[in-house]
Amino acid sequence: MEKTEDLVAEIEKLGEKLAAARASIARRIIGQEEVVDLVLSALLSGGHALLIGLPGLGKTRLVDTLSTVMGLDGGRVQFTPDLMPADILGAEVLEEGKDGSRSFRFLPGPIFCQLLLADEINRASPRTQSALLQAMQEHEVTIAGHAHKMSEPFHVLATQNPLEQEGTYPLPEAQLDRFLLQIDVDYPSREAERDILLATTGDDDAVASAVFAPDELLAAQHLLRRMPVGESVVSLILDLVRACRPDDPSASDAVREAVSWGPGPRAAQALMLLVRARALLDGRLAPGVADVLALARPVLVHRMALSYGARAQGASLTALIDDVARGFDVSAQAAE
């Protein structure tokens, strides 16, 4: 049985390393601390993240910085309507040897990296979007009947423009569910924007340094899964996810009336991992109720859908999730 003292020492050591990683990222990414923490939480949890934000808010710069700081081999695919699955996955090509013999050789596509930036993922056709599904879930792709393993670790950070919808294809529910969380990238504050202005228009551009190596990130992911989670946190995760399903007895009238379908078991799994990551980044040894409530929106918002009537009335899915989480927060405070 693992000694508690050894686990505590490992968690504290990882916490120091994460603090150094955040400091290195902050040299190039200014005023997006919450976004950085959520992306780091996704990487620590071994999952993928969907970044929603307007152009020019630093999403591409963030992914580039993360690949450097976490010591990962980065790749980038600009999704366009004419992009084909082979442009992402790779293809078998027929080669002829000097002796006249012919054989097929696999040419790997840009997906064969450790941190893939899928830029404007909703601009590609559903067929091309679905090419990512197997890689995101199983960390391998099958081409011409042969399975090709991805390098480990493997993470996808996809970006999406929330406003310009002409010529785009909504992500299918099955693919949305593969993303551990959705991260909304908002405009920076005035003070942060001033710092960005001064830092990016001078002669010298800040440089991030490597803090992690791929094997160290894998070790961190394994350590995260060994972190203890209290029964109260486990119960809250289950109750919160089930309360967002319109056909569950615990759902409120507002959820039953406004939600057409709710989150599945992957939402609870994502919360279970991400609350541990949030505790790690805060330098704590175990997650608490506040971590679950803080992560409710990014974990649930892309795993639910409003009914047609609710959309017609201008209902907000994020506001609904916040209301459900607020109800559990009030209950937790009353219990204390």
Image: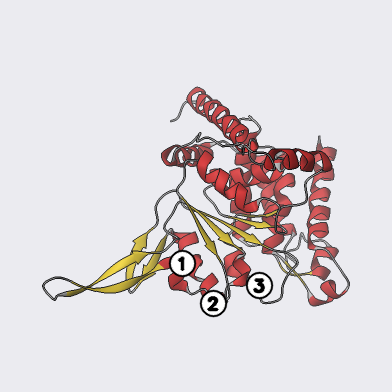
Q: Marks 1 and 3: in contact by CB < 8 Å?
A: no
Write down the residue under mark 1: 88
Q: Residue at x 41, y 58 (%)?
A: 112
Residue 235, percent from left and from top? 67, 47
Q: Residue at x 45, y 37 (%)?
A: 216
Q: Marks 2 and 1: in contact by CB < 8 Å?
A: no
Residue 189 vs residue 48, the one in the foreground: 189
Q: Residues within 10 Å of mark 3 (few under 14, many from 20)?
A: some
Residue 71 vs residue 137, the one in the foreground: 71
Write down the residue under mark 3: 170
Residue 299, percent from left and from top? 67, 54
| Residue 315, placed above or below residue 298 | below
Left or right side of 289 for 257: right
The answer to whether residue 38 of the structure is visible from this angle is: yes
Upstream in sequence: badge 1 or badge 2: 2
Q: Nearer the viewer, mark 3 or mark 1?
A: 1
Upstream in sequence: badge 3 or badge 1: 1
The answer to whether residue 172 of the structure is visible from this angle is: no
Residue 65 vs residue 17, the one in the foreground: 65
Residue 126 vs residue 303, the one in the foreground: 126
Using the numbered discs, state the Cα–Cα distance from disc 3 to disc 1 in whole angstroms. Answer: 19 Å
Q: Residue at x 83, y 50 (%)?
A: 327
Upstream in sequence: badge 3 or badge 2: 2
Q: Residues within 10 Å of mark 2 (few under 14, many from 20)?
A: few
Residue 139, percent from left and from top? 43, 58
